[in-house]
Each structure stands twice: as C-alpha cells, then as structure tokens.
Amino acid sequence: MADIIQLLPDTVSNQIAAGEVIQRPSSVVKELVENSVDAGSTVIKVIVRDAGKNLIQVVDNGCGMSETDARLSFERHATSKIKNADDLFAIKTMGFRGEALASVAAIAELELQTRRQEDETGTLINIKGARFIRQEAVSCRAGCIFSIKNLFFNVPARRKFLKTNTTELRHIVNELQRIALARPEIEFSLQNDGTEILHLPPANNRQRIIHVFGKNINHQLVEIKTETSLVNIKGYIAKPQHVKKAAGEQFFFVNNRYMRHPYFHKALMQAFDKLLPPEAIPSYFIYFEADPGTIDVNIHPTKTEIKFENEKAIWQVLMASVREALGKFNLVPSIDFNTDGKIDMPLANRDRDAVSPEIVVNPDYNPFNDKQDASSFNKWSDHKKSRLDNWEELYRGFESDRSMAHGKGTLQKEGEPDETDSEKGKDDTFIAGATPALLQVKNRYILIPVKSGLMIIDQKRAHERILYEKFLKTVRSGSFVAQQQLYPVNIELSHSDYLLVRDLAGELAAFGFDIRDFGPQSIVVSGCPVDAGNTDPAMIIESLLSEYKSSGSAFRESPREKIAFNLARSSSIGYGKPLTKEEMQEIVDRLFASELPNYSPDGKPVVVIINNDDIEKKFM
C-alpha cells in the first residue's frame, strides 16, 4: 500500500492560513494597518475602492524595509518581532506571527513599494495568488505602500459570501476605529471611491473618542483611573442616562491592543447594577496596562482574544474602579463619612410621657365652595382635637350600611332601589358593541368588564400594534405623508452609524423621513412620518440603528417590518401616561380593528382576560 500522507504545497497552506486570518476586506485593512503601526508610522492613510473588494491601499511613513526584508516578509512565519519561544511572553507589538502578508498574497494581487529613510531607491514587489511575479528597484517615498487588488479572485466561494459595499465598508471603518482608539497619537484617514469618510488627527485618548463618535459624547464621559501593582486601568465610561440598547461603543484595550473580553464586560455590567434599564449597555473605553509576561495574546489567529494570568483579581479591580468613578461624579447614591458637620439626632426623654400629635379640624369647611372665606378656618384653630378622639364615629352605622348588592362589585345602602335589568346589562356592553366601562390602572393598563370576566389591555403594546400595522399599510400603498419639522434636527453620528443611515436612506424615505447629509458624520432630519407625533427624530434614528446592529441579517431580510416596528415602539404612548376615556376608547376600537390584536409586533401579549371563575376563587 502506497504512502498517503504528504506535505501541502505552500500555495495551499497559505490559502488555509488566509481562511483563518482574512475573512473579508476589513481583515486585510487590520493586518496592514497594524504592520504600519509597528513600523513606527505617524501618518497612516487607507484608500479603498468598492469597499475593498477591488482595491485596498495602505500608505504609511514608517521605517520601510530593505530589498532583502521586503522579499522575505511574504514567506510564512517570517517576522521581525520574535526570535525564540521566550519572546512570545514579552510581546509589545501588534503583529508577530508572520502570517498576514503571506495570507494576503495568497488570495489577492499584491504590490509593495517600500524604502528606508537612508536608502536612495526603494523596492517594488508583485505577487499574485502566492505566485511571485517580479521584484525591481523603484523610486518611491520613504515607508511602505501596500496595494491589494481583486481580493479573493482565486477563491470565488469566499468572494461570493461578501456582503454589500456599505456593510463591508462599515466593517473597515470599525477595524480602523479600534486601532485609532488604541493609538491616538497617530494620524489616520480613510478614503472610499475618492471620498474621504474618516480623518483622525493626532490627539489624546478623550479627543480621539470625540473625533470618532462625535462631539455629543463629550459630556457623557466619566473618567476612571486606577493604578495597582497588578494592572493599571484608565479610560472613560458613559453616564447611566446615556446608555444604549445595542452594542457598538464598548472597547477594551490592553497595552494599546484592542481585545474582546466577555468576562471583564460582566464586571463592568456588575458595576452598573440597578442603574441601567433592561437590555441597556453602557458605552466604555477601558485601557489596561499590564506586564506582557502576565498576558497571552497568542490564543487566536486575529489576536483579539487575550488571556490574563490573574483575571479574577483584575475583575475586582475593574468593577471597583467603575463604581468609584460613578460615585465620585454623583451618578450613584454615596455616603460621605469624612464630614466635619454634626448630625443632630433627637434624644428620647424617658421622664416624659409620649404625646400623640394633634390636628386642627374645621367641620364647616366645604371643599366645593370656592367663595368661602379662607379665614373662617382660623376660628376653629383653638378647637384642637386629638386624632384618637371619637374614632368610634368612623364605624357607626357601618354594619347596617355594608349590604353588598347581588352580582355587583359596589356597596349599596339599604333602602336604595336595585338597578334595573337594562342597567345591569351595561357591564356587558363591550360585547354588544356599545361604549364599555373603561378604567385605567397605574397609567399602564386599560380594564374592560366583558361577559366572560375582566379584560386587561397593555396600553403601550396596544398602541404599538395599531401604529405598526398603520405604518406598513401606508408604505405598501405608497400614500405616506411627511410632517415637516418646524426646526430641522441636526444629528451627529459616529462614522459607522453614519454609513448605516446612508444604507437605510431609501427605506426611511418610504416611511416619510426627509433625511439629508450635513457634512461628515452629520445628518439633518427635516421631516418625519405624521403618525410619529412629537417623538424626537434623534431618538427614532438611535432606536433604528440599535435594532440594525442587534438583529443584523434579520433586519436586512425584512427592513420595512423592522423599521415599522421601531417607529411604532418609539412613537407609541408610554407607560405612566394618564388617558382620558375618549383616548382609551379610541385605543380599544383601533386595536380590535387590527389584524392581530392579541400580540404586539415583537410577539408579546397585548390582551389578557381574567375569567369570572378565577375572580370568584379569589373570594373563597
């Protein structure tokens, strides 16, 4: 039997490695920009065409490479960062594995121009699908210029699964933002199809956060800073009143490297315990400084998952740091024991009997008489009666007056005529189609007596169902009406959110939104759907973006349903709003005229009926 085990060719092994490191154009941007950071660059420019599918170009002013280094850099596991196994535990650079350039060259057409500052000429290298094409001397600027063309040209299955240009560009923006937030001293820029969509000048950490996410985030940030022998923690957290319903502004960095760490995220959420509404996530930008020997960055090909040696201890330090910051800025109740003032505490006098408090009563006061003299109360000021006096009067005659009317839930005095049969029927008028007896409870529920028992309607969910179906019907018929804003609302967004709004612009216009560009990262909302009422357009846009980020592909598969639901949720009446009988009646009528009155757009129950049998059991 012949031998069956053989070594893979370099081209195949490089493509396998590329499958782990390069998932989409943003992966190429990440690897190349990280190399530029390690090269000591102070200015890094990224140029893409068709969201990186046809061209990705990274230009830097770093140290550059010699002719030999340039050629060797495309070999697998060729790196200048480590020389032996011990160096793996003292890594301070972004890249070190030596897989990035070989992986990129295996699935694209690559061109490199590089020159060191001290060299007179540079080096040009062309590689196509891991096949070396040429190498020659050229005149070029100091640093490196990487040009990646026709990504996945030789792996059509991978190229087929790429998303739309807007989605891929958003991923590129996200990757570049992560590196830029970790390196605020470096200038970054991004161009797509000749348009500059991102420019970040050198700054400090707080300024870089503002440049990335807009000026509005400045007043939301609270600084944290803790130094220990184990780890140093600094950064910013958002105030509890500015939390969002979807992830997107949560960043951990260790030694200037972005990382994902669910365990530390739980620590931060624990610090915000009981300060956040359900399903809300605070924004945070946390920078860890730790000894490289106490962390392991080599547990994932993309180097975004990092293992700490003392995670439990760091968990406690992080949670304490966040709680300290929240308490220091009076964002949570705190007790200050270091005070010079004295607290006066009344002391009990055991030699004196306790005296009940006394009140002044005016038996002639008529609350319905607006013309009565207020001073008439003064003549009774001397008639002080203890609240314990004549308390028996409260119950006098109670036994004779508490006869319960048969079949009713109200007290009926003796001698009063019972209701006629026609009046009794009013309890079931909801079934008959006439006006039912409506009652609002806790400004949250609408109660309606029905033949089978008691119907309870959630007022917010009912209104959501009504608006949801109305929005969809309006869009499908094309009869939407836009309500122009008296004062157009200017909304400043992060770069990623700005791209999302541009992607949804067509669908939003179908609902009656009038949205226009207002410079980079800004939009102006001049009109909203009529049924949106007086809802803040900024709140509607934020809710839509949160839903888009959380649902992902589900949003793209049915964008109109998702937009209609978010509009309904944002525009519906809230809990705690008192309703008149006319308003309650309108909600009930419109609810039961809808197609699915029993459930809200997200599948939650709207109507609950408590049967008569269940009510009677409560009194047994």
Image (cartoon, rainbow, N blue to C red):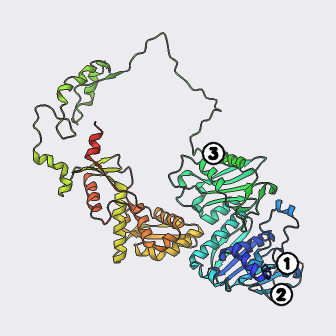
Of the residues tagged 1 and 2, which is closer to the observer? Answer: 1
The residue at the point 56 percent across, 56 percent down is: 281
SS for callout 3: helix
Asked if residue 539 lies left or right of residue 399, the reply is right
Residue 499 location, quadrant: bottom right
SS for callout 1: loop
SS for callout 2: loop
Residue picked out by circle 3: 323
Asked if residue 462 lies left or right of residue 109, the reply is left
Mark 1 is on which residue type? Answer: Met
- Percent across and percent down for residue 376 are 25, 26
Residue picked out by circle 2: 139
Mark 2 is on which residue type? Answer: Ser
Residue 434 position (above or below residue 504): above
Residue picked out by circle 1: 65
Mark 3 is on which residue type? Answer: Arg
Q: Real-space Cα distance between discs 1 and 2?
A: 14 Å
Asked if residue 572 lies left or right of residue 215, the reply is left
First in sequence: mark 3 or mark 2? 2
Q: Real-space Cα distance between discs 3 and 2?
A: 56 Å
Residue 11 location, quadrant: bottom right
First in sequence: mark 1 or mark 2? 1
- Percent across and percent down for residue 200 are 68, 69
Q: Real-space Cα distance between discs 3 and 1?
A: 48 Å
Q: Residue furthest front?
A: 1
